[in-house]
């Protein structure tokens, strides 16, 4: 029987994938509010944008957690996260501090997804 090992990079990949779960739940439970947020960021029409984001987040989460095509999963994650960074800047301006709702968190998370997939 093969030995199961979990390297630090595996743990990072799994955590990057798991972090999408609360985002998915939030978007699904607050679909109308999320639609308005997307439209405020210029992502119109909002409903198809939300559905596309949910699909990409599911692909990213499943792929990264279960190591299924992790590079493609990371690509899905990066697309969503850079879109989120863009939306944050569009809505809140180009601030780089978490207290001012800056884009640093999704950018950091996107970089962590890239690192974990290689």
Image (tube, grey):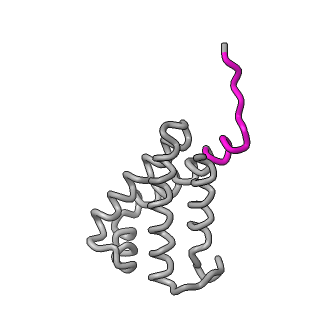
Residue shown at 51%/46% (left/top)?
71
Q: In this rendering, would 78 be left or right of 44?
A: right
The quarter of the rendered structure image containing the N terminus is top right
Residue shown at 65%/80% (left/top)?
97
Q: Bounds of the magenta span?
A: 2-13
Give x and y (percent) for residue 51.
Answer: 32, 58
Q: Is residue 48 above or below residue 37?
A: above
Residue shown at 62%/48% (left/top)?
116
Q: Residue furthest top?
A: 1
Q: Is residue 29 above or below residue 91?
A: above
Residue 44 colored magenta?
no
Nearest the camera: 91 or 69? 69
Give x and y (percent) for residue 115.
Answer: 63, 53
Place residue 43 in its image quadrant.
bottom left
Q: In this rendering, would 80 be left or right of 35?
A: right
Residue shown at 46%/82% (left/top)?
91
Place residue 64 in its image quadrant.
top right
Give x and y (percent) for residue 82.
Answer: 49, 67
Residue 11 colored magenta?
yes
Give x and y (percent) for residue 62.
Answer: 48, 42
Total labels drawn: 0
Q: Is residue 26 above or below residue 87?
A: above
């Amino acid at each position: 029987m093969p030995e199961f090992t979990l390297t630090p990079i595996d743990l990072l990949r799994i955590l990057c994938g798991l972090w999408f779960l609360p985002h998915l739940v939030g978007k699904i439970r607050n679909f109308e509010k999320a639609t308005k947020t997307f439209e405020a960021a210029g992502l119109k029409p909002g409903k198809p944008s939300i559905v596309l984001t949910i699909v990409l987040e599911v692909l990213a989460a499943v792929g990264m957690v279960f190591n299924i095509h992790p590079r493609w999963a990371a690509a899905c994650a990066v697309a969503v996260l850079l879109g989120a960074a863009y939306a944050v800047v569009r809505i809140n301006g180009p601030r780089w501090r978490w207290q001012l709702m800056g884009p640093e968190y999704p950018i950091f998370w996107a970089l962590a997804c890239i690192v974990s997939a290689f």
